[in-house]
Image (cartoon, grey):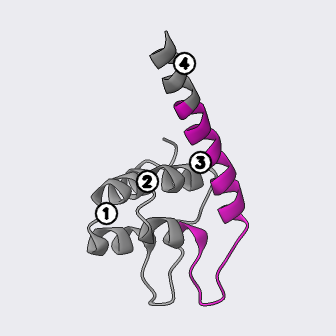
């Protein structure tokens, strides 16, 4: 019973953290041209990337090096993040 409660609390905190973080980063943009999606990709934050995609983040946006987020994920070896982005590019309604 205690483990179920601990699991519930951890899951709830993580879920709210992702929601709050994604809302905050949706509103920001770095002066050097790095948008929030690229920032989440560069930090390998899969759940934040997923959340940003669900909220309409532009998958066509380019960073200061003119690279799209999916290319940034692939070259950084963030394959789980790249998978999220590729699925969104191929099936935008998912």
Mark toward the viewer: 1 or 4: 4
Residue 16 - label: none
Taking depth in this image into account, of 54 and 6 the one nearest to the observer is 6
The residue beneath circle 3 is 18
- Tell whether 48 sits left or right of 30: left
Among numbered discs 1 and 2, the one appearing first in the sequence:
2
Among numbered discs 3 and 4, the one appearing first in the sequence:
4
Residue 50 magenta: no
SS at badge 3:
helix
- Tell whether 6 sits left or right of 75: right
| Residue 60 visible to the viewer | no
Residue drawn at point x = 60 percent, y = 32 percent: 12
Q: For residue 44, which quarter of the picture?
A: bottom left
Q: Label 1, label 4: how many angstroms apart (C-alpha)?
A: 32 Å
Among numbered discs 1 and 4, the one appearing first in the sequence:
4
The residue beneath circle 2 is 46
Relative vertical location of residue 32 with respect to residue 86 in this rendering, above or below = below
Residue drawn at point x = 38 percent, y = 50 percent: 87
Range covered by the magenta-colored residues: 10-37
Relative vertical location of residue 66 with respect to residue 35 in this rendering, above or below = below
Among numbered discs 2 and 4, the one appearing first in the sequence:
4
Q: Are marks 1 and 4 in contact (CB under 8 Å)?
A: no
Residue drawn at point x = 32 percent, y = 54 percent: 80
Q: Are marks 1 and 2 in contact (CB under 8 Å)?
A: yes
SS at badge 1:
loop
Q: Label 1, label 2: how many angstroms apart (C-alpha)?
A: 9 Å
Residue drawn at point x = 54 percent, y = 67 percent: 37
The residue beneath circle 4 is 5
């Amino acid at each position: 019973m205690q483990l179920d409660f601990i699991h519930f609390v951890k899951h709830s905190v993580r879920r709210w953290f992702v929601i709050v973080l994604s809302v905050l980063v949706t509103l920001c943009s770095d002066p050097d041209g790095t948008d929030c999606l690229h920032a989440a990709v560069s930090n390998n934050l899969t759940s934040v990337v997923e959340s940003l995609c669900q909220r309409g983040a532009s998958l066509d946006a380019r960073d200061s090096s003119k690279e799209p987020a999916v290319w940034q994920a692939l070259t950084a070896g963030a394959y789980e993040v790249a998978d999220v982005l590729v699925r969104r590019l191929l099936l935008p309604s998912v």
